[in-house]
C-alpha cells in the first residue's frame, strides 16, 4: 500500500463542519473575535460524501446574547433557539463526545470555521479534542480542482456541478450536508495537499 493509499484509508471517515455565528448588517467590518457561534452542524461521511451520522446544536452567545434582526433573517435562527442552548464550551464538549475516535480529520468550506472555533476556545479558556484533528479547507481544494477563481461560495459551487441546494442556506447542518456533496468532485490528492499545510490552532495542546 502506498503512502497516499494509506492516508486515504485512514481518512475514509471525515467530519464536515459548518458554523453559524452572530452577525450584523455591516458584517464585513466585524472582526472574528467579536463574533460568537450560534449553531454547530456536522456530518460524518466518507470521501464520496456518503453520510453516516450527523450532529447539530444551537449555541448561546454571551457577549451579544440578543441576535440582530439581520442575523435572524439570514439564518432563520430564532432568539428562543439560542436562549435555551448550551454555551460554547458546553457545546464543544457535546461535539467532542459525538466525534470521539470516529474520524481522522475534519473539513470546512474555507478557513472561517477553523478560525472562529480557535478564537472562541482561546477567548473562553477552553480546549477541544475535535479541533486538534487535522483540518482541510475544502474550498481551496475545490478551487484547485475546478480552476475556479471567483464565485467560490458554497451555493456557487453546488450550482457549478448543476446541483440544487438541499435544505435551508445559512443553517449549519444544511451547509455541512451540502459541503459533503462536493467531496466526490475533489480528488483525494487535493485533500492530502491541504493536509500537508495544516496549522494546529493556538488553543490546542499536543494531547490526543
Image (tube, rainbow, N blue to C red):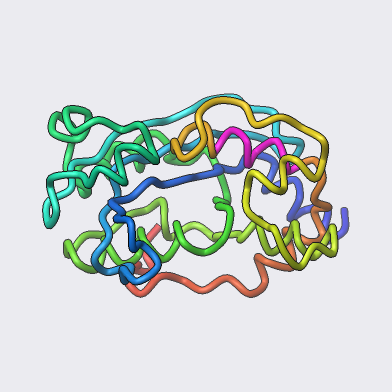
Q: Residue at x 17, y 65 (%)?
A: 125
Q: Which residues are magenta?
A: 176-183
**In the figure, 201 relative to 19: above or below?**
below
Q: Position of residue 174 (x, y in %)?
A: 52, 32
Instruction: Residue 16: say if magenta.
Output: no
As rendered, which of 145 and 147 lies closer to the eye? 147
Instruction: Residue 181: say if magenta.
Output: yes
Q: Position of residue 103 (x, y in %)?
A: 55, 43
Q: Residue at x 35, y 62 (%)?
A: 27
Q: Residue 135: which quarter of the image?
A: bottom right
Q: Position of residue 198 (x, y in %)?
A: 57, 70
As rendered, which of 111 and 188 lies closer to the eye? 111
Q: Residue 82: which quarter of the image?
A: top left
Q: Residue at x 39, y 34 (%)?
A: 98
Is 10 on the left-hand or right-hand side of 56?
A: right
Q: Position of residue 203 (x, y in %)?
A: 31, 69
Amino acid at each position: 500500500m502506498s503512502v497516499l493509499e494509506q492516508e486515504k484509508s485512514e481518512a475514509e471517515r471525515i467530519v464536515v463542519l459548518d458554523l453559524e455565528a452572530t452577525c450584523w448588517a455591516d458584517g464585513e467590518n466585524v472582526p472574528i473575535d467579536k463574533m460568537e457561534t450560534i449553531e454547530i452542524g456536522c456530518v460524518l461521511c466518507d470521501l464520496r460524501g456518503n453520510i453516516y451520522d450527523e450532529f447539530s446544536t444551537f449555541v448561546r452567545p454571551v457577549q451579544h446574547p440578543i441576535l440582530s434582526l439581520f442575523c435572524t433573517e439570514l439564518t432563520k435562527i430564532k432568539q428562543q433557539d439560542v436562549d435555551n442552548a448550551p454555551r460554547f464550551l458546553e457545546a464543544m464538549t457535546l461535539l467532542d463526545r459525538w466525534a470521539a475516535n470516529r474520524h481522522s480529520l475534519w473539513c470546512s468550506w474555507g478557513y472561517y470555521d477553523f478560525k472562529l472555533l480557535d478564537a472562541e476556545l482561546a477567548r473562553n479558556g477552553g480546549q477541544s479534542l475535535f479541533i486538534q484533528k487535522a483540518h482541510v479547507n475544502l474550498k481551496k481544494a475545490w478551487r484547485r480542482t475546478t480552476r475556479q477563481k471567483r464565485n467560490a461560495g458554497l451555493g456557487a459551487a453546488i450550482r457549478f456541478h448543476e446541483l440544487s441546494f438541499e435544505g435551508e442556506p445559512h443553517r449549519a447542518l444544511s451547509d455541512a450536508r451540502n459541503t459533503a456533496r462536493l467531496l466526490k468532485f475533489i480528488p483525494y490528492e487535493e485533500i492530502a495537499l491541504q493536509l500537508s499545510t495544516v496549522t494546529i490552532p493556538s488553543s490546542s495542546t499536543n494531547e490526543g
